[in-house]
Amino acid sequence: MGAGLVSLAVPSEMAYTGMVVPKALMVRQVSGGFLTDYECVADLAEKATAIVAGPGMGNVPEVDGFLAGLLKNTSCPLVLDADALNRLAANHDLREKLVTRKGVSVLTPHSGGMARLLGKDVFAEMSREEQAKSLGDFVASKGSSISQSWLKSISYSFALILQTL
């Protein structure tokens, strides 16, 4: 099973500056040092069958508008990892948009990231299933099984879940 057309949105300052990019990957340059505005990728996002956001994005408040746009305006499966999770942990409004989002969301935190997302005291008191239920559709806690919000535990690898979305 292949992914089909894959596009990578990167700030223009970073595009092709030492990046090793497979030839099959379409690179979309956006202005600015960070992905700050959803509108810069709206046309790509509206056509997407799945979106991954977070790796290398930057754990800075400037990207919150971009993430808010993804959460509000897309309904395809959305995988949030790395800096996207850090921004969710830092911004309560983004977490609210995640919980009310139309479409499947997959979060990939490690245990420290999950504690930041939920608050350390809450995290310590909740089961893995309760943690997942409080955050959305799927939570792939790194180094553990994957939990669905409706309290079913699955033991597939994260890669298999992505292939079946």
Image (cartoon, rainbow, N blue to C red):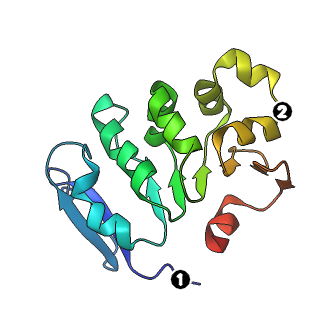
* Residue 141 vertical placement versus 75 (above, below): above
| Residue depicted at x 15% and y 45% | 32
Disc sitting over residue 130 in the figure: none
Q: Which quarter of the image is occupied by the N terminus?
A: bottom right
Pinpoint residue 20: horizontal percent, then vertical percent. 30, 64
| Residue depicted at x 30% and y 78% | 23
* Residue 77 vertical placement versus 116 (above, below): below
Q: Nearer the viewer, residue 71 or 14?
A: 71
Pinpoint residue 24: horizontal percent, then vertical percent. 34, 80
Decide if residue 158 is on the left or right side of residue 87: right
Asked where in the image residue 165 lies, by quadrant, the reply is bottom right
Local SS, label 1: loop
Pinpoint residue 113: horizontal percent, then vertical percent. 59, 32
Disc 2 to disc 1, C-alpha distance: 35 Å
Decide if residue 35 is on the left or right side of residue 157: left
Pinpoint residue 29: horizontal percent, then vertical percent. 18, 60
Q: Nearer the viewer, residue 23 or 81?
A: 81
Sort mark 2 into few (<14), some (14-19) or many (20+) by Cα contacts within 10 Å.
Answer: few
Asked where in the image residue 77 lies, by quadrant, the reply is bottom right
What residue did someone put label 2 on? 127
Regarding residue 16, the answer to whether it shows in the image is no
Which amino acid type is shown beneath numbered disc 2? Ser
Q: Nearer the viewer, residue 95 or 114?
A: 95
Q: Residue furthest top?
A: 121
Which amino acid type is shown beneath numbered disc 1? Gly
Disc sitting over residue 2 in the figure: 1
Decide if residue 46 is on the left or right side of residue 156: left
Regarding residue 46, the answer to whether it shows in the image is yes
| Residue depicted at x 44% and y 39% | 83
Local SS, label 2: loop
